[in-house]
Amino acid sequence: MMGIVMDRLTGFAVFLLTLLPLLTNCDGATQPKPIAQELKAPVVAIASSPEKVTPVVIVNSPVGKSAVDSPAGAKVATVGRVAPETVLVPGGTFNNGVSNITLTSFRMSTTEIPQGLYRSVTGYNPSTFNDFDNKPVENVTWYDAAEFCNKLSVLAGREKVYSITDRTPETGYPITSATVSFDMTKNGYRLPTEAEWQFAAAGGNLSAGYRYAGSNTVSEVAWTSENSSNQPHEVASLSPNELGLYDLSGNVWEWCQDWYDDYPTTDQTDPVGADSGSGRALRGGGWAGGCGVGAEVKCRGSYFPDYDGNNFGFRVVLRP
């Protein structure tokens, strides 16, 4: 189902980057195939080893703003309300190219999770491009993203959505394997389902039918290889879509809740994807994608949930 199988220890990133235009599926066909997204980018690392610091807690701050303003500042802040800025996405029905999908209302973070917030919650910043706290966190596995959601939920006084057991390693990051289940009735943070992601990226009930998330001109809303200078950029630095959501096209690929699978051909309500699989869904394209490849709202991707590429990030949702 993954479409590409190769030894992940052999420096295949550059090879996949050259193949990317051939591996992207954006046509909404009945039998969509997963794409191989841009992986570890060659030669363009800005900083060296991942940064590990004492956790700090953002206290009523805008998303991405660190509670520590200076490298010489205190590393611990008073615990307060921890919450990324979110936008309400009213429920509605849309067509994913194969069937009609009806969704219940949800809230989505206005941006990809930035490094400052990720570090504040986990005490760790795995990102390669770690020169700005407001750049999206990257080098996170799907398991890392799920655990972040649980930790953020606890800090915000909400219920955990995920049950994570058999974690490898037992502590620390990246998480390379785990048994994960979820309870959608809980009120905590979680990854968006693929259907939620697509509906929100298209503008929800306000959709103007744009090719990309908020525009038919990719450079207005997305950081791709044509304008990114081979790196991700600070979140919300381009125009938002109709709902006020940023970077749903470009910047970093975004992990979704679902195991990747063919779309069901029957109409669905609040679908959560297949029960199992080998790859988790990815959406939105990233900074290394040329000519907007993968950045279109309807494009789909997937990869192994234990992979932590520097073009992989995520955003969060929760029930209102």
Image: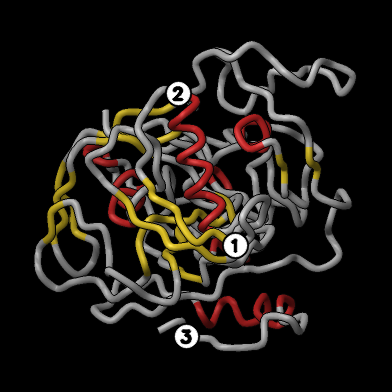
Residue at image mark 1? 168
Q: Secondary structure at mark 1?
A: strand
Residue at mark 3 to residue at mark 1: CA–CA distance:
26 Å
* Residue under the image location 23 percent in, 78 percent down: 30
Q: Which mark is residue 156?
A: 2
Q: Where does the image place residue 223, in percent across and percent down from the top left? A: 62, 50
Q: Position of residue 229 (x, y in %)?
A: 77, 53
- Please state which amino acid type lies under the numbered disc 1: Thr
Q: Give x and y (percent) for residue 188.
A: 36, 34
Q: Name which residue lies at 58% across and 58% down.
A: 141
Q: Residues within 10 Å of mark 1 (few under 14, many from 20)?
A: some
Q: Which mark is residue 3?
A: 3
Position of the C terminus, as image quadrant, is top left
**Alpha carbons under labels 2 and 1: distance apart:** 26 Å
**What is the residue that sits farthest to the left in this orientation?**
267
* First of labels 2, 1 by sequence position: 2
User: Label 3's element?
Assistant: loop
Q: In the rendered structure, which disc, 2 or 3, sits on the residue that comes first in sequence?
A: 3
Q: Residue at x 10, y 63 (%)?
A: 267
Above or below, comparing residue 167 to residue 222 in the picture: below
